Image (cartoon, helix red, strand yellow):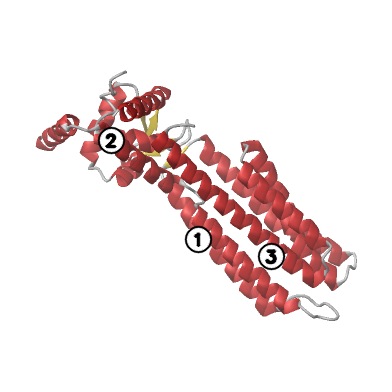
Amino acid sequence: MSNEHDVEATTEADDSDELAPREAARLLARAEREARRQFDPSPPWITAFGGGVILVAYGALWLSVRGQHPYSGPSLGVVALVYAAVAVSIAVSAKVYRRATLGVEGPSVRQQRREGVAILASLVLGSPVLQGALYHYGAGDAIVYGVIPAAAPLIVVGTTVMGIAASKADRPQFSAALAVVAGGVVAAFAGPSGAWLAAGISLFVGVLVYALARARSQRAQAAKIRHGPT
Amino acid sequence: MDPLDQVIHAPARLRIVATLAALPAGETLSFTRLQEILELTPGNLITHLRRLEEARYTQSEKNGNGTASCTSVALTPQGRAALNTYTDTLRELLGAL
């Protein structure tokens, strides 16, 4: 009872505190900024981190196959390193996503989960299925372990993300996905070792451009709150 | 110039409304996460939410029973509109200063 009395007293004190308009504007801007930071499932820094992982992984793959005659594919050690780097990147992203959506429920969270499943399915199924089919029909190592694993994920996952971005009218995401798909097309014709280089560069550029666009859009939103719509 | 909405114009309630408004319309936030973000005591948060609910700016829903129960809070369309009006009024006031 006394606890409830204290709470009422605190609330009354909060109400009677003279809050100057300038102080209220500062408080509002700070609360909005903090809330956006708390609820952001993929902050720009995590996207940039993913870009760094991509650059290292594809760079290692390209270095391991550069100058191979005949082409035999990346070494098992490099493939293991790449899988480990991708697993770390996915684990960090998943942790940030879980933290951002903790306690949040509703249609947009369910939509994000469905989008995640679609992207994961295209990533896991797209390239391995094509590689398996091509291997089955006797395609050479340059195709099965070179061109397809380098180019196909970019084209398959990129078009999936393009569809998702188009449905949300998310221009930065759509443009980044389009750049990645274009990179995948270039990689498909860059030869088995050149494919890894082309794929790595286009994926890195696409992800970095997206991270910068997100950071810019967040700064613009904050400015809009401070100064009003223009 | 309209006066500032006194239901929102209190530090704790301003932060509650701004935090809930950062979620897309139709989303709910658990009471515990809201409390964690705002660093308010449960009693204090309940009292401020009660005031906002009386003005129909927020709505709370209790899901489940007993220890597994969880209260979720959401900003109503009226609450979102009130925050927009409050922000506009604040801008006018600051522009006039």
- In the rendered image, the quadrant that contains the C terminus of chain B is top left
Protein chain holding label 1: A
Protein chain holding label 2: A
Mark 3 Cα shell of 10 Å, populated few (<14), some (14-19), many (≥20): many
Displayed quadrant of residue A162: top right
Task: Tell me the amino acid under the disc marked 3.
Answer: Gly
Q: Earlier in the sequence, mark 3 or mark 1?
A: 1
Q: Earlier in the sequence, mark 2 or mark 3?
A: 2
Q: Nearer the viewer, mark 3 or mark 1?
A: 3
Instruction: Confirm whether circles 1 and 2 share one chain.
Output: yes
Of all residues shown, which one is farthest toward the left? A2
Marks counted in the figure total 3
Please give the residue where the numbered disc 2 appears in the rendered image.
A22
Dot 3 falls on a residue whose secondary structure is helix
Q: Residue at x 81, y 61 (%)?
A: A188
How far across and how far down the image is residue B26, in percent? 47, 31
Asked if residue B74 lies left or right of residue A47, the reply is left
Rounded to the nearest angstrom, the CA distance separating label 3 from label 1 is 20 Å
How far across and how far down the image is residue A134, in percent? 85, 63
Dot 2 falls on a residue whose secondary structure is helix
Rounded to the nearest angstrom, the CA distance separating label 1 from label 2 is 39 Å
Q: Are marks 2 and 3 in contact (CB under 8 Å)?
A: no
Please give the residue where the numbered disc 3 appears in the rendered image.
A200
Q: Residue at x 53, y 35 (%)?
A: A107
Instruction: Confirm whether circles 3 and 1 share one chain.
Output: yes
Position of A67 relative to B44 (above/below): below
Rounded to the nearest angstrom, the CA distance separating label 2 from label 3 is 48 Å
Please give the residue where the numbered disc 1 appears in the rendered image.
A92
How far across and how far down the image is residue A116, in percent? 60, 48
Mark 1 Cα shell of 10 Å, populated few (<14), some (14-19), many (≥20): some
